[in-house]
Amino acid sequence: MVTDAPGTDEGVADSAPAKGHGRAKMGLFRLLGYAVLSGGVFLAGYLDRAVIVLVPLSVIWIGAEVVGRWGRWRHARRAGDGDTIPTRFLMTVAFSVLVVSVLYAAGRSVESFTSDGPVRETLGALDWFLCGALLVVGAPLRAFGGSYLMFWADAAAEELG
């Protein structure tokens, strides 16, 4: 956004983020990130993938949560509440593992009503593809709330118009 107010240099970009719909977009992208991550974990259970796939899925989910909460934790440290950060981290890890396990079990339960197939006990190419897709799509959406997408959209809009 360019400001032309008195007392400012003309043509100087304002570094303050736009208020209003910008926060709504970031919240929507975070929600979309949760939906992608949740759907991927549920899908892994529904496709009857090996239980060992929970390890990389949990690591991806935990990474997205930690990166998404990093700013709040930095703010807490600066505000003098830094001694609670290890507890918050451990709670984030425990809750993330619990959520991933429950979503996987829900997918597995739904699948068990519809199929009698054997359980796969090894990680296959589909498992690694699913983990990679969640890492590339879901985790950044959850962690950054789509701010990187909005950055590229704003840059493209400025270039076009």
Image (cartoon, rainbow, N blue to C red):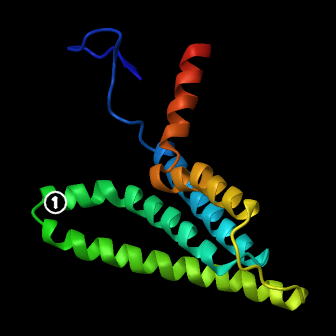
Position of residue 138 in the picture relative to residue 5 (left or right)? right
Position of residue 9 in the picture relative to residue 57 (left or right)? left
Q: Report crowding for label 1: few under 14, some 14 to 19, many 20 or more residues within 10 A (C-alpha).
A: some
Q: Which of the 4 image quadrants contains residue 139?
A: bottom right
**Does residue 121 lie above or below 156 as drawn?**
below
Q: Which sits in the foreground, 6 or 88? A: 88
Q: Which of the 4 image quadrants contains residue 65?
A: bottom left
**Does residue 155 lie above or below 23 as drawn?**
above
Disc 1 target residue:
77
Q: Outermost residue toward the front?
A: 122
Q: Position of residue 157 (x, y in %)?
A: 58, 22
The answer, for residue 124, to whether it is visible in the render is yes
**Does residue 7 lie above or below 63 as drawn?**
above
Residue for point 58% across, 57% down: 33
Q: How many marks?
A: 1
Amino acid type for the residue under numbered disc 1: Arg
Position of residue 139 in the picture relative to residue 15 (left or right)? right
Residue for point 42% across, 23% down: 1
Q: Outermost residue toward the left?
A: 80
Q: Position of residue 88 (x, y in %)?
A: 29, 73
Secondary-structure class at tag 1: helix
Residue for point 70% across, 64% down: 127
Q: Outermost residue toward the top?
A: 10
**Does residue 147 lie above or below 71 as drawn?**
above
Q: If the image is split into quadrants, where does the C terminus sit?
A: top right
Residue for point 82% across, 89% down: 112
Q: Position of residue 97 (x, y in %)?
A: 49, 78
The answer, for residue 161, to whether it is visible in the render is no
Q: Position of residue 103 (x, y in %)?
A: 63, 79
